[in-house]
Amino acid sequence: MSISKEQLEQSFRGKPYVELKDLVQLIEDNFGFNVTLQRKDEPAFTDEQKKRMTSVIFKDEYVLSQLRQAKYDRENGISTYSDSEEEFAQLLKEVQND
């Protein structure tokens, strides 16, 4: 994917400075990407975002059915989640609390 120098110059014609939002708009318009920017020194997700995502995931019936199946398999000697009984028990406990 590329953009010609002429297209770039045309996009920013008459602007003394190219702002970051202009570059984002150029990428989205010309390449069809949805661009989100984040500072390098910031964590990927805030604790609040992680909590909301976890809540959404564990309200999904498909995810819950997979966990129920994994619990059933675990109880019948088939480990499909992990090799750690403690990790699996903790996951089930967290899901049941939501």
Image (cartoon, rainbow, N blue to C red):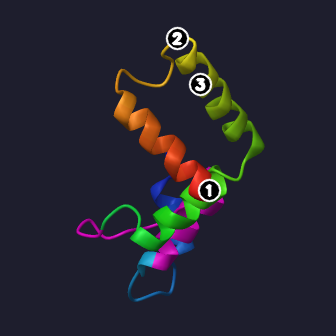
Looking at this view, name the residue that lies furthest to the left.
41
Of the pair 81 and 14, the residue shown nearer to us:
81
- Upstream in sequence: badge 3 or badge 2: 3
Q: Residue 76 magenta-drawn?
A: no
Mark seen at residue 70? 3
Mark seen at residue 78? 2
Of the pair 9 and 81, the residue shown nearer to us:
81
* Label 3 SS: helix
Alpha carbon of mark 3 to alpha carbon of mark 2: how far?
A: 8 Å
Residue 67 appears in the figure: yes
- Residue 42, by quadrant, is bottom left
Residue 32 appears in the figure: no
Which label sits in the foreground, 2 or 1? 2
Mark seen at residue 30? 1
Of the pair 71 and 50, the residue shown nearer to us:
71
**At x 76% / y 43%, what residue is drawn?**
61
* Label 2 SS: loop
**At x 53% / y 62%, what residue is drawn?**
35
**At x 63% / y 51%, what residue is drawn?**
57
